[in-house]
Image: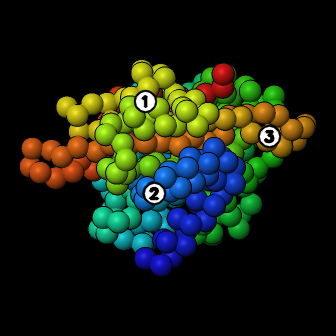
């Protein structure tokens, strides 16, 4: 488990290094006396042998995580799985991948060309999920991918790293609703994703979620530096199910909207 703790720390430092917005929100919450607990982290990839969900999940499974559920997002051509530790203090891990065989032939070939650039030694690493972008990429190729799939463009630009971390609302003490937390976030100058409403989900499905909009950051491409939406911070409120257990899964309809937090605007 110590290995997983170290990996999670690296994922967090890489994430806030790329996404100062999250550091600011985290610092504001802790400065107000809150204890910030991470509900889950999310990783993105392509559905291709050697880089897909199974590969990114390897270190977590080795550290005691087990499959919690599987999800399909047909409209976005994505599939995902979530993994949970037997230790309830550990965050869940949500890993998604683009289903390449339902994308255009041009996109499939472009992604294959990226994957073919990955050095052979990369596949031996046990920290692939925090290794960044292992291929060369020009801005025109990024835009071409993103025009068909924002998700495909994001993975091409940023590679393998945490796409978002998530504040567990239930561990906070100063807010009586997710809407109140959202107001706190917006008052700090961080706009929220309003796709489907600023809050997705409901007590009836045992989960409410909101997220910031991923701010643009300077990304170095082969042909120069360009502004590109990076990562976002999510907020999740979980409710107890009829059996008294806190809901530990995800709601596909809500996650579908949350994915749009990294769309270009």
- Whether the residues at callouts 2 and 3 have beta carbons within 8 Å, the answer is no
The residue singled out by tag 2 in the image is 33
The residue singled out by tag 1 in the image is 256
The residue singled out by tag 3 in the image is 218
Q: What colouring method underlies this structural image?
A: rainbow
Mark 3 crowd level (few <14, some 14–19, many ≥20, 10 Å Cα)? few
**Lower position in the chain sequence, tag 2 or tag 3:** 2
Position above or below: 98 against 14: above
Name the mark nearer the viewer: 2 or 3.
2
Position above or below: 4 against 175: below
Name the mark nearer the viewer: 1 or 2.
2
Q: Estimate the x, y position of residue 147 in percent, counting from the top left.
A: 67, 22
- Can I make out residue 225 in this image? yes
Mark 2 crowd level (few <14, some 14–19, many ≥20, 10 Å Cα)? few
The quarter of the picture where the N terminus appears is bottom left
In the image, farthest residue toward the left: 243
Question: Seen in the image, is 186 located left or right of residue 14?
Answer: left
Name the mark nearer the viewer: 1 or 3.
3
Q: Give the CA distance from mark 1 to mark 3.
A: 26 Å
Question: Seen in the image, is 132 located left or right of residue 255?
Answer: right
């Amino acid at each position: 488990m110590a290995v997983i703790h170290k990996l999670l720390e690296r994922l967090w430092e890489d994430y806030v290094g790329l996404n100062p917005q999250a550091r600011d929100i985290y610092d504001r919450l802790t400065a107000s006396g809150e204890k910030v607990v991470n509900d889950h982290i999310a990783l993105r990839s392509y559905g291709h042998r050697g880089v897909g969900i199974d590969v990114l999940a390897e270190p977590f499974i080795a550290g005691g995580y087990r499959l919690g559920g599987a999800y399909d997002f047909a409209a976005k051509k994505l599939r995902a799985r979530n993994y949970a530790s037997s230790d309830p203090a550990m965050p869940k891990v949500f890993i998604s991948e683009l289903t390449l065989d339902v994308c255009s032939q041009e996109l499939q070939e472009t992604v294959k060309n990226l994957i073919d650039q990955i050095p052979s030694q990369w596949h031996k690493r046990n920290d692939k999920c925090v290794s960044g972008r292992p291929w060369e990429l020009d801005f025109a190729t990024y835009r071409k991918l993103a025009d068909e799939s924002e998700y495909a463009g994001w993975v091409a630009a940023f590679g393998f790293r945490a796409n978002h971390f998530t504040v567990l609302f239930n561990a906070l003490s100063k807010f009586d609703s997710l809407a109140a937390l959202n107001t706190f976030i917006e008052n700090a100058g961080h706009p929220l994703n309003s796709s489907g409403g600023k809050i997705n989900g409901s007590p009836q499905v045992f989960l409410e979620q909101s997220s910031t909009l991923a701010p643009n950051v300077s990304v170095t491409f082969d042909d120069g530096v360009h502004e590109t939406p990076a990562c976002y911070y999510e907020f999740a409120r979980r409710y107890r199910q009829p059996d008294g257990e806190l809901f530990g899964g995800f709601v596909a309809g809500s996650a579908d909207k949350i994915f749009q937090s990294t769309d270009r605007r």
